[in-house]
Image (cartoon, rainbow, N blue to C red):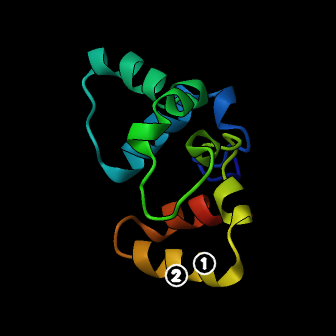
């Protein structure tokens, strides 16, 4: 990953475990070793789609809640938002994570 941000992975499904570990490290979150497998499994698109009725926020009515989990590629959510929606997201998340993490989440 020389010359790249440690979270810069175009396809999260290619190395979900590695990206999750890099994100946890970047945010200073200690995860017990025996919890990783369950956490990575819970973060897979098939698992999140299967749990969509429980996981997807009920703030906007949608026909298919599992469609909330579209691609598994970082930046997919940013591409799905209009400019004003992305700006609102950035304002709301500005203090929740380091700027480089928010940039990673919002990149096109």
Look at the image and tell me in which quarter the N terminus lies.
top right
Does dot 2 land on a helix, a strand or a loop? helix
Q: Which mark is residue 85?
A: 1
The vertical placement of 54 against 76, above or below, is: above
Point 66% across, 30% down: residue: 13
Look at the image and tell me in which quarter the C terminus lies.
bottom right
The vertical placement of 39 against 87, above or below, is: above
User: Quick one: label 1, few (<14), some, or many (20+) residues within 10 Å?
Assistant: few
User: Quick one: label 2, few (<14), some, or many (20+) residues within 10 Å?
Assistant: few
**Along the line of sight, which residue is nearer the eye, 28 or 90?**
90
Q: Which mark is residue 108?
A: none
Q: To which residue does mark 2 refer?
A: 88
**Along the line of sight, which residue is nearer the eye, 106 or 6?**
106
Where is residue 10 drawn, in percent x and y? Answer: 73, 44
Q: CA distance from mark 2 to mark 1?
A: 5 Å
Where is residue 31 drawn, in percent x and y? Answer: 28, 31
Does dot 1 land on a helix, a strand or a loop? helix
Q: Report if the CB atoms under discs 2 and 1 are less than 8 Å apart.
A: yes
Point 47% across, 21% down: residue: 41
């Amino acid at each position: 990953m020389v010359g790249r941000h440690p979270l810069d992975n175009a396809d999260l499904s290619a190395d979900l475990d590695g990206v999750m570990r890099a994100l946890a490290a970047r945010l200073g979150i200690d995860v017990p070793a025996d919890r990783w497998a369950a956490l990575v499994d819970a973060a897979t698109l098939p698992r999140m789609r299967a749990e969509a009725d429980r996981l997807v926020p009920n703030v906007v009515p949608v026909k298919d809640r599992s469609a909330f989990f579209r691609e598994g590629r970082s930046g997919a959510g940013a591409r799905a938002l209009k400019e004003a929606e992305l700006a609102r997201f950035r304002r709301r998340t500005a203090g929740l994570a380091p700027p480089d993490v928010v940039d990673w989440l919002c990149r096109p």
